[in-house]
Amino acid sequence: MKITVDVLRTIVGASHVLTGNDVTSRQEDWMTGAPCQAGAIVRPASTEELSAVMRACFECKQTVVTHGGLTGLVHGTQTSPDDLVISLERMTAIESVDPVGGTLTVQAGTPLQRVQEAAQDAGLQFPLDLGARGSCTIGGNIATNAGGVRVIRYGMMRQQVLGLEAVMADGRVVSSMNHMLKNNAGFDLKQLFVGTEGVLGIVTRAVLRLQPPTPYEHTAMVACPSFEALTALLAQMGKTLGGGLGAFEVMWQNHYQLLTDTSGRHTPPLSTEYPYYVIIECLGSDDARLEAQFRDALEQAMEAELIIDAVIAQSSNQRDGLWAIREDIEGLKEGLDPVLTFDVSLPIADMERYTQTLEARLKESWPDYQLIVFGHLGDSNLHISVGVGSKEPTVRRAVEALVYEPLTALGGSISAEHGIGLEKRAWLGSCRNEAEIELMQTLKKSLDPFGLLNRGKILDEALFE
């Protein structure tokens, strides 16, 4: 590591620079549980402290890796002994809530769930929601342009960010803390930092857009007899429920069976014999009207034979039980260990053929394979988990080829919402053309000329050799 611990201690205080066992006792991410390998961890408490840290790093060309909630799945927080980790764990303040303007100003290290709770206390809601809500941070959500289960209604994290503040590689602070819905005064600079995984700057604060509350929700799990019925159901629910459709989360039979009958982790609310299962949720402010509309929509779908079985949650506990099956990532990890995970986008119409082809090709190479599919169907996003008994690099590369190569012809993406990190970097060219990658490289070199910020993530580190 090029920067000295003494320099860092001068900036943030001795107790906020970790070394030795205090570093290696921490994990680099949730999925692998690998120990952090960085030379040190520095924990600034403000944008100003982080700015000073980055000025010092710029002077000695010290590479840094940003750590937030460590819930990512693409090795975006992986380190080497030459790296300095910047942890935003002390930057967790909710600075203000404006219930009239519908905004919330927050530091980047704040967990998503705390933001949701603060919005609710103000009589509003922050609509981004995902299973890791208690651990993931706002800065990480912004850096990865997180999606979650309500994208179908509210959009990705990008749609929730009105303004932000970020520290550049040389320590300069870009403060674009816009609170307005409309602002066309020149470039929208915040977009440089949304979804770019910390390679162009480190987000420290943000102005988030809040939404009117939807205090009532009605949730059902339904079974569909075919993929054709499944897509027809999505279209019908969109028309019947309109803006009230909050979630349409699909589980292939292999996912549902593994987490219920096979593992015993959940009691199946419906028989496990059906090919597709959907959690449908509608949101609104008029409970009686919403319930009638929801039940009418389900009855119409039953009459049209788009649904062959259904259960409607009668309490918050029953709702949580249905969602627990969909969100049990730990169960998938245990059931397929060692598991290879993927997060892809592709046209909905091609999903059935794509997954069937993937299954056939996996079977050719690994007869005892396991394939689990679930995801945000209405958002064109599938999560794929594969178990072939090994995750050695050569095996992983072979499975990646089966998952990623067909996406190019379909106009799909190797990453729907998890980012690129290190894991998908070699495949970036399969869904981004040469001109796009060259522009990404130009931006990186312009804003971070020494390649200090998350070097090697998204773009090849050879760019700076």
Image (tube, grey):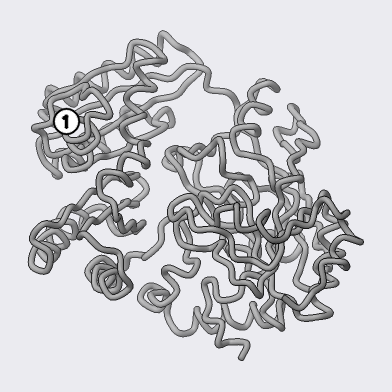
Quadrant of res 2: bottom right
**Residue at the extreme right:** 10
Q: Nearer the viewer, residue 377 or 417?
A: 417
**In-image side of 149 versus 374 (left or right):** right
Number of numbered labels in the structure image: 1
Residue 397 to residue 417: above or below: below
Q: Nearer the viewer, residue 23 or 407?
A: 23
Tell me residue 463's x, y (percent).
58, 87
Quadrant of image for the N terminus: bottom right
**In-image side of 172 versus 370 (left or right):** right
Quadrant of res 137: top right
Tell me residue 404's x, y (percent).
29, 69
Tell me residue 280's x, y (percent).
32, 29
Which amino acid, mark 1? Asp
Residue 313 to residue 273: above or below: above
Quadrant of image for the C terminus: bottom right
Residue 228 to residue 48: above or below: above
Residue 335 to residue 304: above or below: below
**Residue at the extreme front:** 21
Q: Nearer the viewer, residue 158 or 356?
A: 356
- Per the image, the residue denoted by label 1 is 261
**Residue at the extreme top:** 288
Tell me residue 388's x, y (percent).
20, 60
Q: Nearer the viewer, residue 439 or 21?
A: 21
**Residue at the extreme bottom:** 465
**In-image side of 39 versus 326 (left or right):** right
Q: Residue at x 58, y 51 (%)?
A: 158
Q: Residue at x 76, y 45 (%)?
A: 90
Q: Residue at x 8, y 32 (%)?
A: 273
Count neighbours of disc 1 (C-alpha within 10 A) and say few if under 14, some if 14 to 19, many if 20 or more.
some
Circle 1 SS class: helix
